[in-house]
Image (cartoon, rainbow, N blue to C red):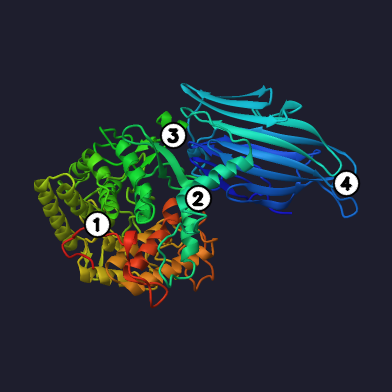
Amino acid sequence: MSDISSGPTLVRSGTFAVLGADGGITGRRGASPDGLFRRDARHLSNWALSVDGSAPGVLVPATGELVAQSVLTPPGTRDEPPAYTVFREQALGDGCLTERIRLVANRDAPVSAMVTLTVDADFADQFELRSDHRSYDKDDARRTATATPDGVAFRYERGDWLSRTTVAATPAPAEVVTVEGRDTARQLVWRLDVPVQGTAELLLTVSAQPHGAPRAVAPAGPAEAAAELAADTDAFTGAPTSPTGALPLPADAPDGLAAACARGLRDLAALRVPAPGPDGEELRVPAAGVPWFLTLFGRDALLTSHFALPYRPELAAATLGALAATRGTGYDAFRGEQPGRIVHEIRHGELAHFRQVPYGRYYGSVDATPLFLVLLDGYTLATGDTAPAARLEAPARAAVEWMFRDGGLSDRGYLVYTPDPGGLVNQNWKDSEGAICFLDGTQAEGPIAVAEAQGYAYDALVRTARLARAVWGDGRWADELDTAAADLRERFLRDFWMTGPDFPALALDGKGRQVDSLASDAGHLLWSGILDEDRARRVGRRLLEPDFFSGWAIRTLAAGQPGYHPLSYHRGTCWPHDNAVVVLGLARAGLADEVRTVARGLLDAAGHHGDRLPEVMAGYGRADHPRPVPYPHSCSPQAWAAATPLAILTALRETGAGAGTGAVAPTGAGAIPAPDHGGAGA
C-alpha cells in the first residue's frame, strides 16, 4: 500500500487542490497543507472516503495533472479477495473540484456497499496555515454546515465577509450525518448496489465561492473538466502541434532543453490567473506559484514574462496591463503604497480584507517598478507593437517619478528601501530577514540600496528614454533620462565596486557602507548593462568558481562565507530564476562557455525533478550528493522557475552556445534587441 500523505497537486485558473495519494484531504497545516484552495483560502479541509466502515487501501496512488486517478480497495486476503475495487477520478473546474467514484464488482454475485464521505471546510486563510506560529483575532467569525437535497453547504461569516463551499452529489446521499465533536464536519452516506460484473458510481462536485468571487460553473464531470483544461493548455503551449510549441531550439540543443521547455510551458499555462486590466478587462497573468503564491506578484510576473517574452509575448502584455491597473495612487504606510509604485503582491483573503495583514495590495518591493519599465520596452522591441507603450505612458511616467521621488534616486542617489516591520524586512527579490548581510552574516540596516535594483533602475532609465523618443515623442525628457542613467552608472561603479575581491558589493547600508558578502545579485548587473564590459566578464567568470557554482546552479551566497548556509532561503540556496537572469547576463557579456555550463547544470537538475525546475534547491554541490538536494519549503510549480528554461533557450541562441559546435545563430523572436547602454556589457 502507498503512503496516503503524498499525492498530486491540480492547478487551474487560480484554483488548486493538494490531494493525498488516496485522493483524500486531511486538513493538515504547516509546510505542506492539503485541501481545495481559491483566493487565498482553503475551501475544503476534509475529504475522507470509507467503504463498508474502513478507509480503503491504495493500490495505485493518485497521479496526473489534468485528472488525478487512483485505485483503492477494501480489505481482502488471497483466499477472500475484495468484492469490489474503487476507482477515483478527480479534476478541477474553474473554482471547483469534481470527482467520479466507481465501484467495480469483482465477484459473480451482487454486492451492496456502504460508502461514506467525511467532508468539512475550515475556510482557513493561507496566512493561518503557515508554520510561522502567528495567530489572528477572529472572535466574531462563524462557520455553519447545512444539509441540502444533494449534499451539504458550508458558510463562513465574519462582519461583511461571506464565503461558501457546496458539495453536491449524484445520486444524492441517503443521509447526511453530523460528525460528533467536530462543529461543521459532515458524513455523506450512500448504500450502493453493485450488479454482477457491473459498476456503481457517484459523481461529486465541490464548488468554492470566496467572498466577492463569482459562482463557479461546474463541468459535467472529471473528463469534461480535464478536456477543458487540456484545450486551454494546448492553446497556450502549442501542443499537440509540437511538444514545445514550435520553439526555435538550437540544432545541437543540450539534452533536456526541449523537455524542460515543454514542462515549463505547461506549468505557465496552469499558473495563469485572472486579473483586471486598466479598463476593467479580464487579463490572464502568471501567478507566482503553488501552494503559497497563486496570485499576482509584481516582481515574479515581470521576470517570468521577460523570460517568456520571445516565445509567449501575451504574458508580458497581460502582466503590464494588470500591474498598470494596480499601481499606487496615494500614500498608505500600512501597505507601502506610494504614487506610481508597482505592486508587490495582491491577496484576496479574509485577513487582507480586514487589514490584519498588509498584503491585500502590498507595495513593499524596491525593484518591481523599474522592472515594469524594463518589460514595457522589452515587449515593444520584441514584438514591434507600440500600442501597449502608448496606452501605458501615464503609468510609465508615474513609475519613473516614483524612482526619483519615493524610491530615493533624487535624495540618496540610489533606489533604496527601509525595512518594513509589519511586512518585509528586505524588499528586493531576496526578501527574507537576514538575506542582505555583511560578510560576517549580520543583516544590513536601512535605508538599503541593493546592487541589482540599481542595475534595474539604470536599465529602466535607458529603456524609458528610448520609449520617450520612439513612442511618446518627448526628446527632451529622453535626454534627461539618459543623463540620469549615465550619472547612476558612474556612481554605482564608484560606490559598489570592492577592489579587494574585485567584485560588486551586495548592497550599501543606511550609512553608505558596502555590504561585503559575495552574492549572486552581481550576476543581475550583467543583464542590466550597468557594468562596463571588462568588469562584466570578470564578474561572470567569478560566478562560475566552485564556491558559487554548485554544479547544478549558482548559489545565492558564495560558500565559505560566515553567512553561508546551504538550506537558508536566500543565503546559500540555488534559485533557477536567479540563474536565469545571470545566464541572460552572461549571454549579454558574450560568455558562451559560462552560459553553456550553467545551462547544463540547470537542465540536469530539471531532469531529476521530472523536467520541472523547482522554485529553489539547497546549496549542496554534486560532490555532496548525486542528485540536487531539495529545499524543504519550495513551491512547485512556480512561475519564474517554469520560465527559466525559456531564458536558457534565449541565452543559448544569442551566444550560439548549444551542446557544443554548430549551434544556430539567434534569429527571429529569440534574439531580443537591447537598447543602447553606452557600451556597457557585450
How much space separates mark 2 and mark 3, taking CA atoms?
Answer: 29 Å
How much space separates mark 1 and mark 2, taking CA atoms?
Answer: 37 Å
**In terms of secondary structure, where does tag 2 sit?**
helix
**Label 4 or label 2, whichever comes before in sequence order:** 4
Q: Answer left or right for 490 relative to 418.
A: left
Residue 122 visible in this rendered orientation of the protein: no
Residue 422 visible in this rendered orientation of the protein: yes
Do residues under tags 2 and 3 come within 8 Å of each other at their CB atoms?
Answer: no
Q: Amino acid at mark 2?
A: Asp
Disc ID at residue 107: 4
Q: Amino acid at mark 3?
A: His
Q: Nearer the viewer, mark 4 or mark 2?
A: 2
Q: Nearer the viewer, mark 3 or mark 4?
A: 4
**In terms of secondary structure, where does tag 3 sit?**
loop
Query: What residue is disc 3 on?
Result: 348
Choose top left, top right, bottom left or bottom right for residue 653: bottom left
Q: Answer left or right for 387 relative to 310.
A: left
The residue positioned 80% from the left and 38% from the top of the image is: 53
Q: Amino acid at mark 1?
A: Gly
